[in-house]
Image: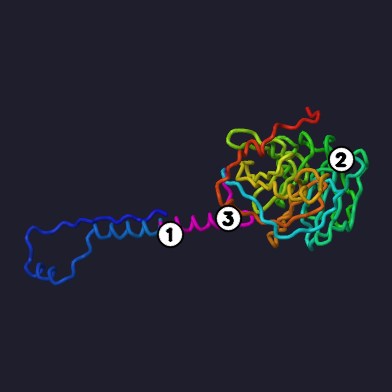
């Protein structure tokens, strides 16, 4: 805010001074000089600037998603808060929180694809819609009472009633392929296994905007399952132990989550047939994050934690594999 400047008003005085006037002027307190006003204004301005700077620092430290402030060079790992059973036969493609300690999950593989509602505490499948064997289920998101799902390699998508999982509509996917879906409650974000983050109008299912995701000048390929988390879009990067934190506005990389410990822990426990990390769900009300993977026997509730020491790995080697190609144009 601009402050009004003080004006130094000059007054013409008579060349001849009346002794009485001189006496009166000496008896009156001296008026503050312009320099004193200016000094006071400068001090106030400096105090305001420092106050704003402190507020900015505090707000930055408060963080964004799950209490951690993002940075393009900052890498996080996770602390496991809870472990829950998960169907080891579920080839998880899409995951989202449904309320009341339940999840909606989309699974893949031809002949085994489905949309299901799952109890978090037990891992029990409470309701399921089995897809036709010609479809390979992929990403899933929820907007209102409608579940949106895409299928792999077909440019086909489906809409289901969240209450009973009945299929109520079918749509054509305008992305190159169907991999991941998420929503902020207004638009749908989509991924197709490339480096593109799409924004889709949920009324028409047409792509209205798209951004190429890059990290330090290089494209981040193989964007897979998506989840909207506290203003960010989190994306599993296929065939890695990495989650990229992206801006929903322009797809900019805000940071990385590197978590090989989950997969390695399962393997060391004898789970040799598991596939890659895939599946992110956010409970907005309680600010809980859930993660799992394809054919994983466990679902994890996690919290982000900043590495105590600088990350020594090469993010580009660990989290940015060469682009996958499945015969897409």
Q: Residues within 10 Å of mark 2 (few under 14, many from 20)?
A: many
Asked if residue 63 lies left or right of residue 205, the reply is left
Tag 2 residue? 136
Q: Are marks 2 and 3 in contact (CB under 8 Å)?
A: no
Chief secondary structure of the magenta portion:
helix
Tag 3 residue? 63
Where is residue 150? Give x, y as percent. Answer: 82, 42
Q: Report the coloring of the rendering.
A: rainbow
Where is residue 327? Give x, y as percent. Answer: 81, 28
Where is residue 74? Give x, y as percent. Answer: 57, 46
Please tell me which of labels 1 and 3 falls first in the chain.
1
Q: Residues within 10 Å of mark 3 (few under 14, many from 20)?
A: few
Where is residue 13? Give x, y as percent. Answer: 13, 58
The answer to which image quadrant residue 162 occupies is bottom right
Please tell me which of labels 2 and 3 falls first in the chain.
3
Say if residue 247 shows up in the picture.
Answer: no
């Amino acid at each position: 805010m601009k402050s009004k400047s003080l004006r130094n008003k000059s007054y013409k005085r008579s060349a001849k001074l009346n002794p009485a006037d001189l006496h009166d002027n000496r008896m009156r307190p001296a008026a503050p000089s312009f320099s004193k006003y200016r000094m006071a204004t400068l001090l106030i301005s400096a105090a305001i600037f420092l106050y704003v700077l402190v507020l900015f620092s505090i707000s930055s430290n408060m963080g964004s998603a799950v209490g951690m402030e993002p940075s393009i060079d900052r890498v996080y790992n996770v602390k496991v808060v809870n472990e829950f059973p998960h169907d080891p036969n579920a080839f998880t493609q899409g995951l989202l929180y449904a309320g009341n300690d339940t999840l909606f999950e989309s699974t893949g593989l031809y002949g085994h694809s489905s949309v299901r509602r799952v109890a978090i505490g037990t891992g029990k499948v409470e309701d399921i819609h089995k897809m036709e064997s010609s479809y390979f289920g992929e990403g899933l998101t929820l907007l209102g009472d409608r579940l949106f799902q895409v299928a792999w390699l077909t440019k086909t998508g489906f809409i289901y009633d969240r209450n009973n999982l009945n299929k109520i509509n079918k749509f054509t996917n305008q992305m190159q392929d169907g991999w991941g879906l998420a929503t902020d409650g207004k638009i749908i974000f989509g991924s197709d296994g490339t480096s593109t983050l799409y924004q889709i109008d949920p009324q028409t299912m047409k792509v209205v905007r798209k951004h190429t995701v890059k990290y330090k000048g290089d494209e981040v390929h193989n964007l897979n399952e998506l989840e909207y988390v506290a203003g960010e879009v989190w994306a599993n990067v296929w065939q890695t132990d990495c989650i990229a934190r992206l801006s929903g506005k322009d797809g900019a990389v805000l940071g990385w989550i590197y978590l090989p410990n989950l997969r390695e822990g399962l393997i060391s426990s004898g789970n040799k047939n598991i596939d890659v990390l895939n599946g992110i769900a956010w409970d907005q009300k309680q600010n809980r994050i859930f993660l799992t993977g394809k054919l994983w026997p466990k679902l994890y509730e996690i919290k982000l934690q900043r590495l105590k020491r600088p990350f020594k790995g090469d993010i580009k080697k660990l989290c940015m594999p060469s682009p996958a190609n499945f015969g897409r144009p």
